[in-house]
Image (spheres, grey):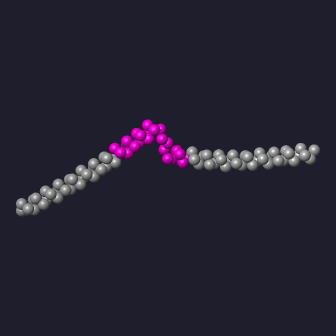
Amino acid sequence: MSNREKILDDLARFAGGTVEIISGAKGQARESFKSRIDDLAQTLDLVPREDFERLEAMVITLREEQEELKKEIKALKAKKTTSKKAK
């Protein structure tokens, strides 16, 4: 192997090692950022998306039930008023 080939081989190894280091640093930075965001969300007492969506579905169901009950009450009041007039 000539001197030039050894230099190119060393440069290739160095470049490969550099890429591995950069990839590792990128992963660490991402994990660190995610950890800080999670800590901030915990500090601010934010609700996870899944919990919010579950609660939103419950509220929608309860509103629908409430509207049905309002209709039933209105119908019962109308029936009561009609029966009083008939007497």
Q: Kindly give the residue lying farthest to the right in the view shown.
A: 87
In the image, taking residue 71 as reference, residue 4 lies left or right, namely left
**Residue closest to the far left:** 2
Is 78 a magenta residue?
no
Give the image location of residue 10, x and y in percent: 13, 56
Residue 22, position in %: x, y? Answer: 25, 51
Whether residue 45 appears in magenta in the rendering, the answer is: yes
Q: Where is residue 19 in the image (x, y as percent from the top left)?
A: 23, 54
Q: Main secondary structure of the magenta part?
A: helix
Q: Which residue is drawn at 73% across and 46% down?
A: 70
- Residue 51: give x, y in percent of width and height: 52, 44
Identify which residue, 80 or 58, lies in the foreground: 80
Describe residue 8's horizontal placement relative to residue 68 as left or right: left
Q: In this view, does 42 lie to the left or right of 10?
A: right
Q: Residue at x 51, y 47 (%)?
A: 50
Query: Which residue does the image show at 54% across and 48% down from the upper left?
Result: 53
Q: Quadrant of residue 41?
A: top left
Q: In which quarter of the image is the N terminus?
A: bottom left
Q: How many labels were placed on the picture? A: 0
Q: Which residue is drawn at 79% across and 48% down?
A: 75
**Residues drawn in magenta:** 32-54
Q: In which quarter of the image is residue 7?
A: bottom left
Q: Quadrant of the C terminus?
A: top right
